[in-house]
Amino acid sequence: MKKITICVPMYNEEENLAVLYDKLDLLSKEYIGSYEFEFLFVNDGSMDQSLSIVKTLSKEDSRVKCVDLSRNFGKEIAMLAGFDYATGDAIIIMDADLQHPPSTIPKMIVEWEKGYQDVYGKRVTRHGESFFKKAFSKMYYKILTRFSSVPVIPAVGDFRLLDRKCIDSIKKIRETQRYTKGIYMWIGFKKKEITFEANERFAGETKWQFKSLVKLAIDGIISDSVVPLRLSLYSGVAIATFSFLYLIYTLITTLVHGSATPGYPTLTILLLFLSGTQLFFMGIIGEYIGKIFIEVKRRPPYLVQEFVTQEQTDKDDEIKE
């Protein structure tokens, strides 16, 4: 009997976990005798009662397990921990806030059984999101499509089913500066699209802030592409050519008409333009160097406080008694 791991990265999701578990448990009952399920939660440094809730669920249900990270490493790293600890023949990644509807999972399983190895969910609607966030997301995907070295599919996130071959391939990629959406496309394998309507958060507030979205956008562009570096090269050549031509023009004008004092505004504009351009591209180069600096340290992507299973929680209770 095949085993399916449902992986749920979580950060301060205490209000959603019980409802999510009930929905997943109800879903699993539809497949009794067909599939074995594992509910793997990855606690990414939650400060609320999320871990305690999962431990309680683990005592009652042996399928519930939890990787408790030593601190908040971010969702990208939390998903890597989920890949490392998942034991299923396939893994389904979904958010804890119920924006990813469990009702879509059966459709993913059907396509997986047809032979597809990466069945990804594509949002057709985004309930509960502001106009600004939707517009920013649309613009981001347009930019990313032009810059990325691998194909980019708009409105596709981490809600997907991955076959064991995909999981094992992603586990080999141990970089700490991760952009998993790009990795999904980079590894290849047979892919299939499933559409779904993204729900509003069941409870609580979103953990994504604008600065987090900007960081994710920068990571998406830089992690899988050297186009910004090439852009800086092409711009440098263009600006140098323009400057050289302007130098010749200034020289000829001076020889023919003599020195003209009223050239200072033009000189000031050119200096500000060139300085601003240099600083902009130095910033791009700095982003790449910063990522190289972090990678060459060879630190592990994450550290684990404990791995919660029913057996472990029973032992802990015995020790306390």
Image: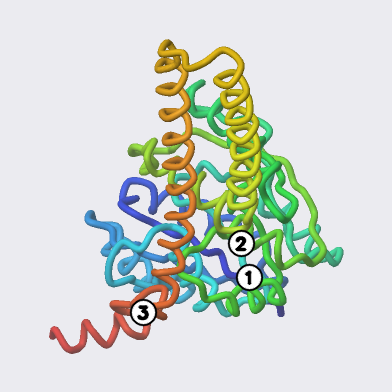
Q: State the image coordinates of residue 36 (x, y, percent, origin top left).
A: 63, 74
Q: Nearer the viewer, mark 1 or mark 3?
A: 3
| Mark 3: secondary structure | strand
Q: For mark 3, does the 10 Å Cα neighbourhood hold few (<14), some (14 to 19), or many (20 or more) residues?
A: some
Question: Which residue type does callout 1 highlight?
Answer: Ile
Q: Relative to 79, does residue 316 appear above or below in the rendering?
A: below
Instruction: Look at discs 1 and 2 and give the one toward the viewer.
Output: 2
In the rendered image, which quarter is residue 201 located in? top left
Residue at 28% x, 58% y is 46
Task: Establish if 67 lies above or below 161.
Answer: below
**In this orientation, which residue lies closer to the viewer: 62 or 140?**
140
Q: Amino acid at mark 3?
A: Phe
Q: Residue at x 37, y 66 (%)?
A: 57
Question: Relative to residue 259, is residue 79 depicted above or below?
Answer: below
Q: CA distance from mark 3 to mark 2?
A: 19 Å
- Earlier in the chain: of badge 1 and badge 3, it is 1
Residue drawn where x is 51% and y is 78% of the image:
84
Left or right of 110? Residue 238 is left
Mark pair 1, 2: CA separation: 7 Å
Q: Badge 3 is on which residue? A: 307
Q: Residues within 10 Å of mark 2 (few under 14, many from 20)?
A: many
- Of mark 1 and mark 2, the one earlier in the sequence is 1
Q: Are marks 1 and 3 in contact (CB under 8 Å)?
A: no
Q: Quick one: label 1, few (<14), some, or many (20+) residues within 10 Å? A: many
Q: Pointer 2: what residue?
A: 92
From the image, tell me which residue sits under label 1: 4
Q: Secondary structure at mark 1?
A: strand
The tag on residue 77 is: none
Q: Label 1, label 3: how many angstroms apart (C-alpha)?
A: 19 Å
For badge 2, the amino acid type reads: Ile
User: Which residue sits at x=48%, y=23%?
Assistant: 132
Q: Quadrant of the N terminus?
A: bottom right
